[in-house]
Image (cartoon, rainbow, N blue to C red):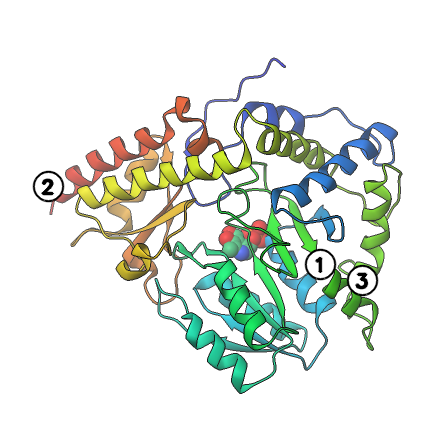
Amino acid sequence: MTFEQAPHKLLMIPGPIEVADDVLYENAHPAVAHVAPEFCQVYSEVLKNLRKVVYASDKVQPLAIAGSGTMGWDMTAVNALQPGEEVLVLETGYFSDGYADAMRAYGVKPTVLEAPAGQRPSLDQVKDALKQKKYRAVTITHVDTSTGVLTDVKAVAEAVREVSPETFIFVDSVCAVASEELRFDDWGIDLVLTGSQKGLGCPPGLSIMLIGPRVVKAFEERKTPPATYYLNWKHWFPVMKAYEAASPAYFGTPPTNLIYALHRSLKTILEGPVSLEERIKLTKQASDKIKNALTEMGLKQLVDPELQKNNGAANGMTAVRYPNGLKAPDVLPKMAQRGIVLGAGIHKDCKDQYFRIGHMGVSAVDTSRGDIDKVLRNLKEVLSESSQKL
Ligand SMILES: Cc1ncc(COP(=O)(O)O)c(C=O)c1O
């Protein structure tokens, strides 16, 4: 492979993220028919490897099609649930609220278990809510990208099983897959949705789901057909099964280049140079380095301090409050001038009070790039310059 990326600003927002050279090269794969045997083989490996990234058995149906993470919300609401069904949404910020909105769009009834910005509902609150009413499903936003709050999916899943074992557990892991531990089978998860552009290290454009056997069964037994054409699993399951068997099938042309890109990045994630476990450890190390340095600079995270102590802050991103007197224009454009793109705040209650740093994928795992140091060095200088002007 001979390939060099065009000079560009270092993308350190919490997705999309920097893409490794070899993945970007695959994204430029020459044109290929979506039914060509060589493409079917690649798609087959992608689907099999997606299971491995979340430790899911062969009973779990993988799906990777054109779309974005948001489409996974729609797919969940319209296929896995029926109008009128009740769902408990664990609020963590902008993205859990979005999942709830997607439910409403299809007549599903979400009850939002509220939490202030930087916090998450407690296990006791989840258990109490489940004792009060029968819910068809609980939705968890694994990492809420608006706040950096990490939910302990394993513990929530245990709590749900204890109180209401028939309730499905749906996990939005768009900002967590391959950056945080996620064990589909061992933790008793029913559905995971994600996208290609964060921990999976690809360009945006793929909506990825892993659907467990209880949900597939419920889908097959549903009384009303899903009110959708493109999103209907009835069309996609046979196509995914055919591709997994390395044979062609058609329902909507797949984004062939993105499948090649994902194929490459999944190989790196699963086969090295570092293992998936090691990747998650390295992502945590990068996160600790950033979070400790921010604390040394006198900055506070958006995640509640108690929650931070209880492993409630994400590995793959950090939401940071501006120091007193500074606002977004004092920091973000100045970082961009220095060639580093950080993200603005997006939580409805405090979006102007904080900014976000993404540290997933190559930027965290390939320390030889020096991305984390570059962000910290420049941020320190920008904050000092801007504070002096106050
Ligand atoms: C946790 C979470 N869920 C869902 C989404 C929506 O994904 P997309 O922007 O790919 O539609 C995002 C996007 O950032 C996200 O972070």
Residue, disc 3: 229
Instruction: Please indicate, yes or no, whether residue 101 appears anywhere in the rendered image.
Output: no
Residue 352: name its quadrant.
Answer: bottom left
Establish if 32 lies above or below 13. Answer: above
Q: Identify which amino acid the numbered label 1 is placed on.
A: Gly
Q: CA distance from mark 3 to mark 2?
A: 57 Å
- Nearest the viewer among 46 and 195 is 46
- Report x, y in % for residue 112: 49, 76
Q: Which quarter of the rendered picture does the N terminus lie within?
A: top right
- Report x, y in % for residue 125: 43, 76
> Which structural element holds mark 3?
loop
Q: CA distance from mark 3 to mark 1?
A: 22 Å
- Checking the image for residue 388, the label placed there is 2
How many marks on residues?
A: 3
- Checking the image for residue 67, the label placed there is none
Q: Identify which amino acid the numbered label 2 is placed on.
A: Gln
Q: Are marks 1 and 2 in contact (CB under 8 Å)?
A: no
> Which structural element holds mark 2?
helix
Q: Is mark 1 within 8 Å of ligand 1?
A: no
- 3 or 1: tag closer to the N-terminus: 1
Task: Write the residue at 26% across / 32% down.
Answer: 378
Instruction: Say whether residue 326 is left or right of residue 113.
Output: left
Q: Is mark 2 within 8 Å of ligand 1?
A: no
- Report x, y in % for residue 51: 68, 45
Q: Residues within 10 Å of mark 2 (few under 14, many from 20)?
A: few
Instruction: Say whether residue 108 is left or right of residue 88.
Output: right
Establish if 37 lies above or below 322. Answer: above
Q: CA distance from mark 1 to mark 2?
A: 55 Å
- 1 or 2: tag closer to the N-terminus: 1
